[in-house]
Image (cartoon, rainbow, N blue to C red):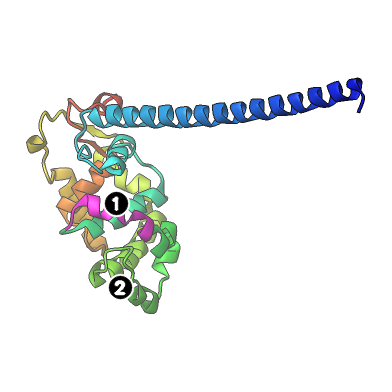
Amino acid sequence: MDLKNEYLHQEKRFLQRWMKQSIDACSRLYIFLKIHDAWVYHATYVLNIRVYMSRFRCFGNKPGQEFYAHYHDFEWGVPVHNDTRLFEMLILEGAQAGLSWETVLKKRVGYRRAFHNFDVRKVSEMRDAALEKLRQDKGIIRNRLKIYAARKNASVFLEIQQLFGSFDTYVWSFVGGNPIVNAWETSQDVPVTTKESDALSKDLQKRGMKFVGSTIIYAYMQAVGMVNDHLTKCHCYANLAV
C-alpha cells in the first residue's frame, strides 16, 4: 500500500472511531437528559399534588384520597341539570344508605357498567334475572333491596319525566330553580335534612321511589348542587356562591 492510500486508510479509521465515540457520547447525553426530564417531571408532579392536596376542602384531604378530592373540587355542589346525571346520582345516593359516600364513589365505574351507563329506560326494563346476577357483582353494593330499587326508581323517574317534561324541571322546583347558598363555618353546622329535602323525599316516596329518605335526599341535593354546602373557608365556596 503506498503512502497516500495508507494515509487515507488511517484517516478513515480515525473518522470511524470519532463518529462512534460521538454517537456514544450523544447517546449517553440523550439518556441523561431523558432521566433528568423524567426526574424533573416527577418532582414537579409530586409538588403539584402536594400543593393541590394542601388546599382546604370539606372532605378528601386524607392520604390516598386524591380521587375524592377531585370529586369534591369538580363535582360536589356543582349544579346538575342533565337528567342522566341526575338519575346516576339518585341511584348512587340510594346505594350509600348505611355506608360512606367514599365507598360508593369507588364503585362508580362498576355501577355505570352494571346499570347501562345509567340509561334510565334500559334500567327500567332490566329483568329479574339480570338484577339477580348483579348480586354477585363485586363492582357494586350487592344489596338485593338496593339493586331492585334501581329498576323501580327508574320507572318512577320516567313517569316524572313524562309529567314534567324532564326530571330536572321537577326536582329543581323544590328549591325554586336556583341553588340554596348556605354559609356554614364548620362541618358540625351542616344539617342532615331540611324542609326542602323533607318535601322532596315525601313526594318521591309517594310516587313509589325507594331509598329516598330525607337524609339521603339532602345528600343528593348537596351532590347535584341544589344546595351549596361547601364551608365558607373551602376554596370551592366562593365560585359556587355566585
Of helix, strand and loop, which one carries label 2? loop
Q: Any mark on residue 201, and which?
A: none
The image quarter in which residue 131 lies: bottom left
- Give the residue pinned by disc 2: 135
- Disc 1 versus disc 2: distance between alpha carbons? 18 Å
**Amino acid at the residue labelled 2:** Arg
Residue for badge 1: 105
Q: Position of residue 137 (x, y in %)?
A: 33, 69
Q: Is residue 77 left or right of residue 85?
A: left
As shown in the figure, which amino acid type bears the numbered disc 1?
Answer: Leu
In which quadrant will I find the C terminus?
Answer: top left
Is 178 one of the magenta-colored residues? no
Q: Which residue lies most toward the front here?
A: 2
Residue 103: where, in percent of width, then height? Answer: 24, 54
Q: Residue at x 33, y 39 (%)?
A: 75
Q: Residue 161 versus residue 183: which sits nearer the camera?
A: 183
**Is residue 84 left or right of 228 when viewed as pictured?**
right
Question: Residue most toward the bottom?
Answer: 129
SS at mark 1 in the image: helix
Looking at the image, residue 63 lies above or below residue 131? above
Q: Nearer the viewer, residue 127 or 114?
A: 114
Q: Which residues are magenta?
A: 99-111
Residue 128 shown left or right of residue 184 in the figure: right
The answer to whether residue 115 is visible is: no
Q: Earlier in the sequence, mark 1 or mark 2?
A: 1
